[in-house]
Image: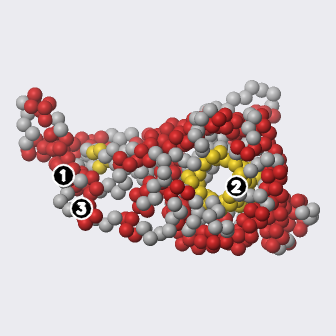
Amino acid sequence: MELREPIERLIRNPREFTQKLAFPDPSDIRIYDETLRDGEQMPGVCYTPAQKYEIAKRLADIGVHIISVGFPAASAGDRKTLQMVMEGKRRGELGDVEIVVMCRSNRNDIDVTLATLAEAGIAPSEVTFFIFTSGSDLHLKYKLGKTLLRLEGRDEATWLDQPLEFYRAANIKWHCDALRYARERGVTSVEFGAEDGSRGDADYFIEYFKAGLAAGGTRPAWPDTVGCLTPEATRWYCTRLVQAMPKGLPMVCHFHNDYGLGTINAITAISCGFKVVSVTANGYGERAGNVPLHQLVTALNVLYGIEIPGFKYAKLRELARFMERMSGIPVQQHEPIIGAKVFAHESGIHTHAMLIDRRMYEAVPASLVGGEMNFVFGKHSGIAIVEDALRKHQQRFDQEGIAIDSDLVHRVTDEIKRLREERAESSKSEDTIAAYDRAMEQLSILEDDVVEIAVALAKPQPFSLAT
């Protein structure tokens, strides 16, 4: 049906309420994907180097600007991934995507990563090194405290007695030494950050960032490691951090989704001047995951009018299905934008309206993200959608000599509802969910498995961990 009035007269445009926010130019916003690093830290997820390379190609193709390929000092697999990705980039298979590797603030991690690059004939200047430490006082004293004491030549027995100021100062000194060391070894792009930023002191982070820049860091990163930020807290922190840094400096926000606020917090950070935003495909990651790529880019586009140049929005659902196969972790069917059923309608009230105009109940344009509206028939179906379905097959009914009249439509509708309730009674949903839970358990190595491994390795006998 063609609407008589312009759509703007019939419904309020959500951008009406967001258009006054000051965002960076869309061409300056960088989508920083951490699927291969933080996404793999989701319990039960493990990718081979070959799988990581295929994921990297998909991410580069859809239009992300930066890809973190992992933690070379942590495993041989991540070292192999780094080499495969860089070789693929040289062949032109990843476009001009920026590659990031992660290192703790110590020379050993940096040396291992440099050696990995050297083995593949890759210069340190071709990769961005993300060198990180911790930032909240909780982490500094109680997680890193003994390490900082050793580095400062202090007795570990004084651990709990040292004031917080000692740990803050020692952390900056230690971190800046690592940044200078990386630069001396030929690294030209150095991202740097500190865990637990959202629970840290803003003034300390400003001091930390300024010291890091002076030591050779090029891009500060500020994380909400435990996902506890609210949009209000995000604006409070991010405004202060951006104002304290050199104008135009690209800064990274890295948020988690423990309260389901990752996307809105990331958008808030961008509106405060952060230009680099961390995401993962399907929102995979530790605990409740990271900022979902699909949510961020689509919300920016539809609700805020920020279209990322060159991003292939229509491939979001295709990417989601690919990542499900790679990870073995399906997303819920009603996951915004990429869920299998988010563009499906069953309710008679909804389906009747959608036949008039899909904007009646379509908040996300299905065509934008590679989706397609469809109807599901069940106990909530109305006669309008049933008749519409029958009319689409008019030729078949004509051949059978059957008239599509009101009586037939009503009888078919009643039978659909009866059949759906009958199927509900014989549903195998509980068995399916139980099988899924078992499959997820088998992806992880649990504590009992660790004990069995230890016992078997300690005894001279063949060992095989049951799967």
The C terminus lies in quadrant? top right
Asked if marks 2 and 3 touch (Cβ < 8 Å), the reply is: no
Q: Which residue is under mark 1?
A: 1
Hey, what amino acid is under mark 2?
A: Glu
Real-space CA distance between mark 3 and mark 1, rounded to the nearest whole angstrom: 13 Å
Real-space CA distance between mark 2 and mark 1, rounded to the nearest whole angstrom: 53 Å
Position of 463 compared to 390: left or right?
right
Residue 444 at what x, y percent from top left? 62, 41
First in sequence: mark 2 vs mark 3:
3
Picture quadrant where residue 14 is located: bottom left
Tag 3 secondary structure? loop
Residue 191 badge: 2
Tag 2 secondary structure? strand
Q: Nearer the viewer, residue 393 or 253?
A: 253
Q: Which residue is under mark 3?
A: 6
Q: Nearer the viewer, residue 134 or 451?
A: 134
Real-space CA distance between mark 2 and mark 3, rounded to the nearest whole angstrom: 48 Å
Residue 292 at what x, y percent from top left? 52, 53
Tag 1 secondary structure? loop
